[in-house]
Image (cartoon, rainbow, N blue to C red):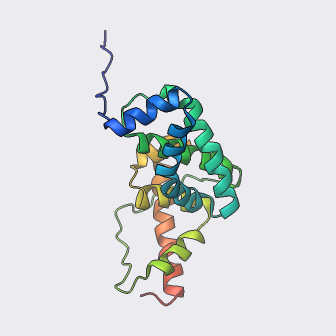
Amino acid sequence: MTQPVKVKEYVINDLEAALVEGCLNNDRRAQKQVYDRYKDAMYTLCYRITNDFELAEDVMQEAFLGVFRGMKNFRKESSLGAWIKTIVVRTAYKKVKKKVHFQPLEDIQMGEMIDWGNSLDAEYLEKAIQSLPTGYRSVFVLIEVEGYAHKDVAEMLGISVGTSKSQLFYAKKQLQKKLKGMGVR
């Protein structure tokens, strides 16, 4: 008989604890503080996933409603910001999921390094990322920009780890081509 695994509880700071408590008590000031504290980073993430300003705003509203409704489910296994980010990612992905078609690909060289060159400009890179197909862009942003692992991305997006790896591989290949086309070596 296996024993249940106890997950180590993340120790949130006093401010986060007060904000969570306030939100649990439907304190509008606490909710506004949570929103104000995380809105910029979460909007950027929404936009990177949706590639649409208006859709990103819709996702933000829906995600923060989900945050406040689901605050009772915050188990303090991560920071409040990380928990909110997960809700935002899942909400954004639900919004674009109808357009996304993942196709698992076999026999690709996952370890291949891509030479991005020396003259990579942030503006060029941002434009190139935004021009990627939704599936490629979602995986690329979550792994390369947000720092998630393939396992976490696969779980969030409802795909296999292999599909996540292949989408990232092809996203990088496509970015390399796009950046070369923009004159970046």
* Residue at 37% across, 40% down: 79
Asked whether 96 or 84 is in front, the reply is 84
In the displayed structure, would residue 30 be above or below residue 85? above
* Residue at 40% across, 50% down: 148
Q: Is residue 100 visible?
A: no
In the displayed structure, would residue 55 be above or below residue 88? below
Residue 30 x, y percent position in the rendering: 50, 38
Classify residue 157 by image quadrant: top right
* Residue at 42% across, 56% down: 146
Q: Is residue 104 left or right of residue 152?
A: right
Residue 88 x, y percent position in the rendering: 55, 46
Q: Is residue 76 left or right of residue 62?
A: left
Residue 10 x, y percent position in the rendering: 31, 33
Pick out the residue farthest to the front: 29
In the displayed structure, would residue 150 be above or below residue 18? below
Pick out the residue farthest to the top: 1
Residue 7 x, y percent position in the rendering: 31, 26
Q: Is residue 25 left or right of residue 97?
A: left
* Residue at 70% across, 55% down: 99
Asked whether 100 or 7 is in front, the reply is 7
Quadrant of the snapshot with the N terminus: top left
